Amino acid sequence: VIKNTAAIIFAAGSDTTAKTLTTFVLAMVLFPEVQKKVQEELDAVLGGVRLPEFEDMTALPYTIAAYKEAMRWHALIPM
């Protein structure tokens, strides 16, 4: 039972993560002007040398807004 429950939890978590990333990438492909602004903001804040961290969220308002819009556009769960 524990093994099956753990497998279900893992599958559910990886499925939603994959769908979230797919939705965001699709949004960036469909709206290249938004992708360009997101990339510029990420490069300005991160310098192109590191990955974003939780503390960077306040310095990435456009990126966060683009992510939230992609999630609004294709919500994974009913609101």
Image (spheres, rainbow, N blue to C red):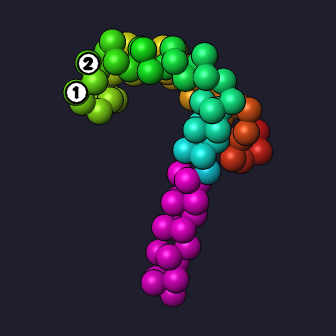
- In the displayed structure, 55 sits above or below 58; it is below
- In the displayed structure, 30 sits above or below 61; it is below
Mark 2: which amino acid?
Gly
Quadrant in the picture for residue 42: top left
The residue at the point 71 percent across, 47 percent down is 77
Determine the secondary structure under disc 2.
Answer: loop
The residue at the point 37 percent across, 13 percent down is 59
**Residue 21: x %, y % from top left:** 55, 44
Determine the secondary structure under disc 1.
Answer: loop
For marks 2 and 1, give the CA distance: 5 Å
**Is label 2 in contact with label 1 (beta carbons under 8 Å)?**
yes
The residue at the point 55 percent across, 73 percent down is 8
Mark 1: which amino acid?
Val
The main secondary structure of the magenta stretch is helix
Instruction: Judge by depth and name the residue closer to the eye, 3 or 68.
Output: 68
Instruction: Judge by depth and name the residue closer to the eye, 9 or 2.
Output: 9
**Residue 66: x %, y % from top left:** 58, 23
**Residue 10: x %, y % from top left:** 49, 67
Residue under numbered circle 1: 49
Residue under numbered circle 2: 47
Farthest right residue in view: 78
The residue segment tinted magenta is: 1-18
Quadrant in the picture for residue 70: top right
